[in-house]
Image: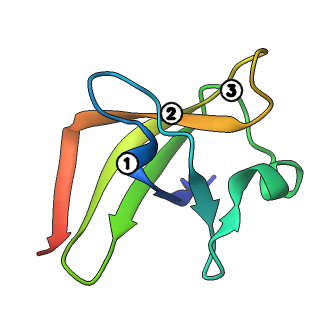
């Protein structure tokens, strides 16, 4: 199975061992929550998280999480895998 590449708003979390909660997928940047069934997301699934804007682009490996208290998907980045794509 190919690892999903998911856009993450790291301003929504992801630092200090926090999980990112604002995630999107595909060229339309559709909310990951809206696509969860069709993408067959699973707790603990390994994904690549990326961020891009006019100034820079980077990616890190991460794992998906879904907590009972929140109905949305989150991702916990592994900052030891940080890769700068463009700056």
Question: Which of pointers 2 and 1 lies earlier in the amino acid sequence?
Answer: 1
Element on which disc 2 rests: strand
Direction right: furthest residue: 37
Q: Residues within 10 Å of mark 1 (few under 14, many from 20)?
A: few
What distance separates the C-alpha of mark 2 from that of mark 3? 8 Å
Task: Please name the residue shown 74% across and 37% down the image.
Answer: 72
Let me know if residue 39 appears in the view. Answer: no
- Please state which of residues 47 and 55 is positioned toward the viewer in this rendering: 55
Q: Are the residues tagged 2 and 1 within 8 Å (C-beta)?
A: no
Let me know if residue 28 appears in the view. Answer: yes
Task: Please name the residue shown 36% across and 63% down the image.
Answer: 51
Can you give x and y, in whole percent of width and height, for residue 66 in the image?
70, 26
Is residue 30 shown above or below 46? below
Residue linked to disc 2: 63
Is residue 13 shown above or below 33? above
Q: Residues within 10 Å of mark 2 (few under 14, many from 20)?
A: some
Side of 35 relative to 49 (left or right): right
Question: Which of pointers 2 and 3 lies earlier in the amino acid sequence?
Answer: 3
Question: Which of pointers 1 and 3 lies earlier in the amino acid sequence?
Answer: 1
- Please state which of residues 54 and 49 is positioned toward the viewer in this rendering: 54
Residue linked to disc 3: 43
Task: Please name the residue shown 41% across and 37% down the image.
Answer: 13
- The part of the image, by quadrant, that contains residue 39 is bottom right
What distance separates the C-alpha of mark 1 from that of mark 3? 22 Å
Q: Are the residues tagged 2 and 3 within 8 Å (C-beta)?
A: no
Quadrant housing the C terminus: bottom left
Residue linked to disc 1: 11
Task: Please name the residue shown 63% across and 65% down the image.
Answer: 25
């Amino acid at each position: 199975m190919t690892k999903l590449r998911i856009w993450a708003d790291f301003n929504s979390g992801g630092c200090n061992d926090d999980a990112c909660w604002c995630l999107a997928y595909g060229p339309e940047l559709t909310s990951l929550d809206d696509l969860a069934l069709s993408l067959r997301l699973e707790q603990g699934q390994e994904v690549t998280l990326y961020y891009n804007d006019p100034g820079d682009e980077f990616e890190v490996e991460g794992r998906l999480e879904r907590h009972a208290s929140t109905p949305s998907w989150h991702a916990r980045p592994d900052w030891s895998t940080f890769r700068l794509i463009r700056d």
